[in-house]
Amino acid sequence: MGKKRNAFCRKAFLGVLSASLIISGVSIPKYVSLAAEAGIVPEYTINNWGSGYQVLIKVKNDTSKREDKWSLKINKNDVGIDSSWNVNVKEAGDYYEITPMEWNSVIEPGQAVEFGIQGSSHVGTAIDISVDGQSQSVTPEPTQPAQPEPSQPEPSQPVNPEEPNPTEPDVPDVPDKPEPSEPSEAVVGDDWLHTDGARIYDKNGHEVYLTGANWFGFNCSERVFHGLWSANMKNVVEGMADHGINLVRVPVSTELLLEWKAGKNVKVNVNTYANPELKRADGSDMSSREIFDTFVKLCRENGIKIMVDCHSADANNSGHNYNVWYGPKGFTTEDWIEGWTWLVNEYKDDDTIIACDLKNEPHGKFSQAEAVAAKWDDSTDENNWRYAASRCGQAILDVNPNLLIMVEGTEETPRPGFDFNSGTQNPNATEDELKYYGGWWGGNLRNAGKYPVDLGSHQSQLVYSPHDYGPLVYKQVWFDKDFTEQTLLDDVWYDSWFYLQDQEIAPLLIGEWGGFMDGGDNEKYLNLMANFIAKNHINHTFWCINPNSGDTGGLLKDDWMSWDNAKYDMMKKTLWTDSKTGKFVGLDHEVPLGSSGETVTTYYN
């Protein structure tokens, strides 16, 4: 109960390992010498979550010459490969032969190429890799990769209200609000939002529906969106808009925000042949912050809004595994708040960024006496997530009172008769002996009704944001039966978070849900959740755009350009759509969503 994963949490590559390098018939010392001459140095990270794994491999050129037509061999005994991205893989005896695509076949001096492999059969703790390369002193202009046109979804057919589908919920179609409440005074912009009861409204008192997806990478050690090693960022943004994504949740880290605040030129590894827009006027590569600003501009032009999410304290692919918002690399609660207030001040005049998800998945098990665990009560203890969220939210709203403040839950809360000091729990305890209610990381909001987050005079900006997943992420106890929507409501959804909307306490935005379409229980869960979101008009951001999310996959396929039509068709019903026109509805009053969507203004006119 309450476990989030087995060994791996999605989005993470666990720990960088030194590659074990061999060449058949050559001793290790001699190979190291050869590797130095060739100048190709590989590193890798292994992410193993039990039922599958990913290996992210980086190949760096440490010489003063170009490496042309590099290749690798990986021993089959060390890892099984089912799929890959950014490389070609073929089997040759006891090895996999890995060769680059045309666009990444050349590694310039001091530069690196990254790619990944994925599988489900076997992976060890170390992988033997042999490397080959051809040094060249002449550097030709690399060929720019072809960028196919992104696929366009078919618009939904208008719904006949007299003939509802008995098995599918109606496409979300938000009603007007009879008596609008007064929104907060805007800094600059006309797209700021506020709440009343369990709904979110625009400046005119019209109810809006935030329906989007996550795109991660800025939170990781790469400090930039994943996928820009091959994908064109403009195409991805336009594809999201055309597929009805009106809000993108963008994970970052406190460490990255403070680097930006300090004016550090954070260099990132991006394929600028696929992304010529990410070069400066002088031909040099943009920094992490400049790429983020370019992304904000692209979203503004395509009618997409942004929710920034502080995913971890440090810039770390596994940083979200740490239980709380302070600790790693010495970052404090004050650093976390400082990073947020700096970011908010930088973008306070831009209503493209409309929401702040204060911290991803606070968690920790009191039932297992974890050293640091996030709790939710009325104390001022440092690990009290409710108190920290209140402090941070108020500090943000002092800078810009118009932002929505998204607050996630925790992992465990005490059952009646117990508190957070009740000690450990017998792992074999019966239902009557349990001391704590468990849940997904960030998914337990049972105490929010009793102890609400306090945003002072700006309480109308508060939205609660649980996370929820299916059995392929972790087989929680509520999946042990032939589960249905009703059993999920009874066992976890209602008391953990849905009561907040149902009882008109506060709006909800499910910040993460998603997973593989496995033809089994996980796909069953996804369809149940999609139908539940749609019929109850719950705001949400689907996890995720990235295909390299290990235990969920993404809306994009491994080429970072094609959409997974089966998964998209499953979640499409959750996107805000005009039932009269079949068009997707954005959150901007002037710029329509994508090439065929519409504005809030058009929807309500």
Image (cartoon, rainbow, N blue to C red):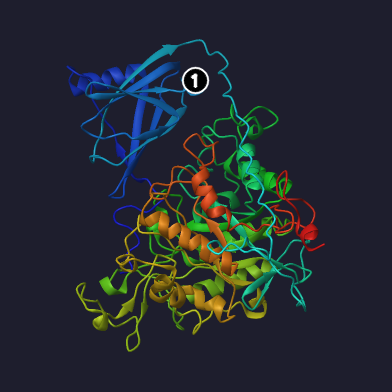
The answer to whether 310 appears left or right of 582 in the picture is: left
**Whole-percent x and y of residue 518?**
38, 49
For residue 594, side relative to residue 601 (left or right): left
User: In the picture, which quadrant includes the N terminus?
Assistant: bottom left
Which amino acid type is shown beneath numbered disc 1?
Glu
Image quarter of residue 172: bottom right
Could you tell me which residue is drawn at 75 percent across and 69 percent down? Answer: 206
Callout count: 1
> Would you place residue 568 above or below residue 194 in this image?
above
Along the viewing direction, whichever of 557 and 412 lies nearer the viewer:
557
Above-or-below relation of 62 to 509: above
| Vertical position of residue 515 compared to residue 152: above or below | below
Residue 575 x %, y %: 61, 57
Q: Residue pushed farthest bottom?
A: 417
Residue neighbourhood size for the residue with mark 1, other residues' Cα within 10 Å, grouped as few (<14), some (14–19), many (≥20): some
Q: Residue furthest right?
A: 605
Residue at the image position 41 percent from the left and 76 percent from the top: 490
| Viewer-proximal residue among 515 and 24 | 515
Secondary structure state at the residue bearing disc 1: loop
Asked if one can make out residue 444 in the rendered structure from this viewpoint, the answer is: yes
In x, y percent, where is residue 306?
63, 55
Residue placed at 41% from the left, 58% from the top? 524
Pick whichever, 534 or 248, lies toward us: 534
Q: The C terminus is located in which quarter?
A: bottom right
Does residue 380 lie above or below 557 as drawn? below
Q: 443 left or right of 416?
A: right
Residue 370 placement (x, y as % from top left): 29, 69
Res 401 visible: no
The structure residue drawn at horizontal position 62% and vertical position 60%, both measured from the top left corner, is 171
Tell me the residue that label 1 is attached to: 102
